[in-house]
Image (tube, grey):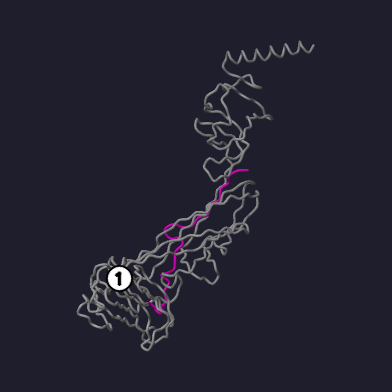
Amino acid sequence: MKKTTFFYCINFIAIVLLQGLAYSQVGINTTDPKGIIDFNSSTLGVVYPNVALLGTDDATTVVNPQGGPIAEGTVVYNTNTTNNGLITDIYPGIYVWNGSEWVVHYKKRQSELHNQTAMLRTEANFSGGYQDIPGLGISDAKTFTAKYSGLYRIEVKTNFAGGKTESNSSIFVTQAKGQFRFLFGGTPYFFETTAFSAYSNYINSGKYYEGIWKESYETNYVTLTAGTTYPFSLSFDAYDAPGFIGNGSTGPTKVNLINENFESYTVVQTFAPDPECPTAGWVASAAANQCSFCTGKTLNINANDNTNCQQNATARMSFTPTVSSVDISFDYRFREKSGNYDRFRVYLHDGTAQVGADLINLVNTSANTSYYGSLAVVAGTTYTLRFEYVNSNRGLTASVDNVKVTEVSGPISNEGRGYIGNEVDCQIEFTYIGE
């Protein structure tokens, strides 16, 4: 009886298939198929092959039973999830092979973009630590509600630029730094950024380059729960910014007490004249063998490798500070004569005695570099910055340029503060990736 039933079943299936082949159409639960195959059911579905793809570019997991590449139009249900931050990442769903990659169908979609609403001028050493990014800060009480349970990608795009630098008699480049803090659901994410600003004394009698934008990205993947609301915010902590007006804060500006490139300068010095020497002590002139950062005329002295020349000269540059601290910088080169005594020394003097240690003291040692330092002074006292050169018998040369002495005593300014937003605003984008 079982064999007879089986025989009739086989014949029935064969008849259906032959009929389908004859008409090139197959109907399941219908006698009127509308295509090559027509499934008709109000309670049942079609189950696609379940496979765990490795990515949208996975051409090996699914095979063509006839051999060769996967046939275009092949359909599977992918069960795998990847979150490598790549465009080939996948999540569970129906995928179709288009000949080169798997294309998902029936996506779950949720994407929200939140933008900065106004430019922020950063403040180094801000009393509250972090400054809110307008429209995205803690005070804006921003929230995101997940539509689905599963993995979300959060992309934070930021734009930061430095403010106005201090000036000098040459070219000056400095860097502003800071840290963004993205808070999401009580969890902080930190990332740093930098931006450069510059000044050139050689363009239009002095030109500042500020607001040079640096774009930064931070991407995080988090698992969220459908229907849950998560608070988020974006803020910034500007680091102390030496080299920028006011150190990157609102405050008094720097004032030049000395800013000399020696193009039009009368040397003040104490020296012992020696007719055997090519220069009468220190002179302001264009000379050979100058320092690397020196241009045009410099303050220089030359012993000319002459056995009979003995230079002993100290050039003096005066200034009177109004506050208790000054910054001093200059470029210099000292060429010593091997086997002979020669010395190059720089120090500060208050009219009575030397103040503090030597800024530079080179004895029989060549150098070609720059100096920068901050010194404590007494407001109202007149000081001289002194450049001393001494050689016995044969010596070579020394040169100095771009001498600058500054103090922070000028008018209040915010020009050194950085920028966040303006040309391009900060953005936070939430995107559902998959279960």
**How dense is the environment of label 1, judged by Cα within 10 Å: few (below 14), some, or many (20 and up)?**
many
Magenta range? 406-435
Q: Nearer the viewer, residue 30 or 390?
A: 390
According to the picture, the residue beneath numbered tag 1 turns out to be: 337
Residue 229, by quadrant, is: bottom right
Amino acid type assigned to the residue bearing label 1 in the image: Lys
Relative to 161, residue 264 above or below: below
Quarter that holds the N terminus: top right
Which residue lies at the image location 53% right of the left edge and 58% below the top edge? 191
Q: Position of residue 145 (x, y in %)?
A: 61, 52
Quarter that holds the C terminus: top right
Q: Nearer the viewer, residue 19 or 329?
A: 329
Q: Residue furthest front?
A: 339
Residue 326 placement, left or right of 229: left
Determine the secondary structure under disc 1: loop
Residue 259 placement, left or right of 425: left
Q: Residue furthest bottom?
A: 352
Relative to 377, residue 422 above or below: above
Q: Position of residue 345 (x, y in %)?
A: 35, 77
| Residue 97 is one of the magenta-drawn residues | no
Q: Nearer the viewer, residue 89 or 170?
A: 170
| Residue 420 is one of the magenta-drawn residues | yes
Q: Position of residue 73 (x, y in %)?
A: 53, 28
Q: Position of residue 74 (x, y in %)?
A: 56, 28
Residue 92 placement, left or right of 349: right
